[in-house]
Each structure stands twice: as structure tokens, then as C-alpha cells.
Image (cartoon, rainbow, N blue to C red):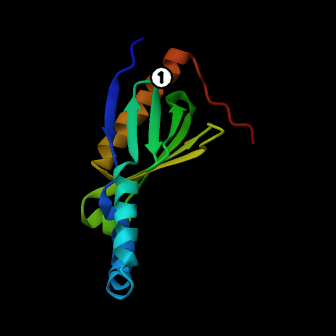
Amino acid sequence: MNEQNIWEGAPSQWVNFGFYLLCIPLSLVFGLGLLLALWKYYDTHLHRFEITSQRIIEQKGIFSKTIDETELYRVKDLRLEKPFLLRIVGLSNIVLDTTDRSNPILTMKGLKEGQQLKEAIRNAVDTRRDVKGVRELDLE
């Protein structure tokens, strides 16, 4: 089965709003705030997510890159969060609980059309589980 791209993007800079506000006084006093704000901007800008029909690929880092992949069939639960500030500007967070050892909780922050993306992920997870023949069994 060919892997198809479902969605690709990066978090919105709105997730850094509070940090940018704190950088303003630091810029006026020390000039350090501008450097910190630029660092945070590029850190968010270069944090990329790619969701395919088989996996979620997360890339992050400015100088050194880290690429983490989570197989879709490992996703156990999806949660849509709409913090106040993000909700005002039409953004949301998607939190995935997974059985992946390296990344058990994957948070995708500041995304546009979060509800539609969450549903697309949920459908892709169900499809991938059917293809792989994976069933979830909770023993509590």
C-alpha cells in the first residue's frame, strides 16, 4: 500500500504569544529579548508535522534536527484542546496518547482547523489498524 500524505504543517506562532510579550521588556533593557524572540520564532517555524496514511512524522530543531516517527496504529486516544487564547484566533491543540516508547504523548500545538484534522487522524488510525490487523486490549 502506498503511503499518502494527509496533512503537513507547523504550529502557529500564536503558541509563543506569552513568550513574545516577555521578550519586549528584555529587548528594551538588555537587547536579549530580540535574540530570544528570534530563536523561539525559528524553533516554532522549523517544527514540522507530516501526517501520512501510515505514520506521523515530527521534525524539530534549528541547528540539529530530530525526526520522530509514530506509527498510526499505535495511537490509542486523541484529544482536541482549545485553550482560550488559541480559541480566539481559531487554533487548537491535538494530543495523541500512543503506545510508542520514544514518544508516548504527542502534542501538536497551534493548528488551524483542529477538529477536521483530528477526525482525519482518527479515520486514518482506524484504517491503518484494519490493514495491520491490530486490536487494542486494555488489561486493568
Which quadrant holds the N terminus? top left
Query: Residue 136: which quarter of the image?
Result: top right
Q: Which residue is mark 1?
A: 128
Q: Is residue 73 above or below residue 84?
A: above
Determine whether, in the image, residue 137 is placed left or right of residue 33.
right
Query: Residue 7: which quarter of the image?
Result: top left
Per the image, label 1 sits on a secondary structure element best described as: helix
The residue drawn where x is 63% and y is 37% is 99
Q: Could you say which is closer to the camera, residue 58 or residue 30?
A: 30
Query: Residue 54: which quarter of the image?
Result: top left
Total marks placed: 1
Q: Could you say which is closer to the camera, residue 122 or residue 38?
A: 38
Q: Residue 25: where, in percent of width, then height?
A: 35, 85
Q: Residue 132: where, in percent of width, then height?
A: 55, 17
Determine whether, in the image, residue 140 is placed left or right of residue 40.
right
Q: Residue 135: where, in percent of width, then height?
A: 60, 25
Q: Could you say which is closer to the camera, residue 21 or residue 97?
A: 21
Query: What is the three-letter code of the residue carrying label 1?
Result: Arg
